[in-house]
Amino acid sequence: MKVGLTVNGVERNVDVSSSATLVELLREGLGLTGTKVGCGRGECGACTVLLDGEPVNSCLVFAAQCEGREVLTIEGLGADRRSEAIRKAFIEAGAVQCGFCTPGMIMSTVALLRRKRHPTRDEIAEAISGNLCRCTGYVKIIDAIEKASRGV
Ligand code: FES
Ligand code: FES
């Protein structure tokens, strides 16, 4: 089947199987492998993308449900001030170790900072509560998001 949707600002028509998930459409249909797959069942958040502006686990969303909708992935973040501030803060705070969780963490961060410019640390922790990180212990990630929020 064909699914028509907008990915990172570009209209696409992608051939997928009727049981394909959104992350399969992105990675296999479009070659956008920045979105990772950890668990494949909605538990780790590695596959987080924005669907019509809201963070979702793209391993749980069927591609067919995305007809006519807008998807933003890590590859779609541009050189705007917010994206730059987030990238810089993650690097400077040491919030990236193996990097596997990072694309999902960053997409959750983008959604949070769009919603609230200067979130508290508790609000940051809540916003990334669906994103698992096995390396950092989360403190550096929360530091990075707080730092990014000062730069936007
Ligand atoms: S791969 Fe989607 S939540 Fe883990
Ligand atoms: S940096 Fe390795 S899982 Fe988060």
Image (tube, rainbow, N blue to C red):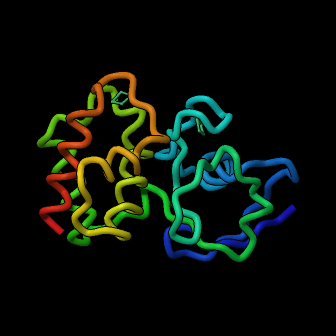
Residue under the image location 67 percent in, 72 percent down: 5
The C terminus appears in which quarter of the rendering?
A: bottom left
Q: Quadrant of the N terminus?
A: bottom right
The number of discs equals 0
Which is more toward the observer, 8 or 136?
136
Camera-nearest residue between 127 and 15: 127
Closer to the camera in the image, 112 or 97: 112
Q: In the rendering, at what x and y percent does residue 12 appear? A: 65, 71
State the residue at coordinates (21%, 61%): 84
User: With 10 as the anchor, is 96 left or right in this view?
Assistant: left
Q: Is residue 21 left or right of residue 18?
A: left
Where is residue 25? Give x, y as percent: 68, 53
Residue 59: which quarter of the image? top right
Whole-percent x, y for residue 49 in the image: 52, 55
Please state which of residues 85 and 2 is positioned toward the viewer in this rendering.
Answer: 85
Residue 152 is left or right of residue 137, and the answer is left
Question: In the rendered view, would you say 108 is above or below 98?
Answer: below
Above or below residue 72? Residue 93 is above
Q: Residue furthest top?
A: 135
Tell me the residue at 61%/29% (across/down): 39
Q: In which of the image's four quarters is ligand 2 placed?
A: top left
Residue 88 spot, x, y in % from top left: 16, 52
Residue 143, quarter of picture: top left
Above or below, 53 against 137 in this view is below
Residue at 66% x, 73% y is 69
- The answer to whether residue 124 is above or below residue 151 is above
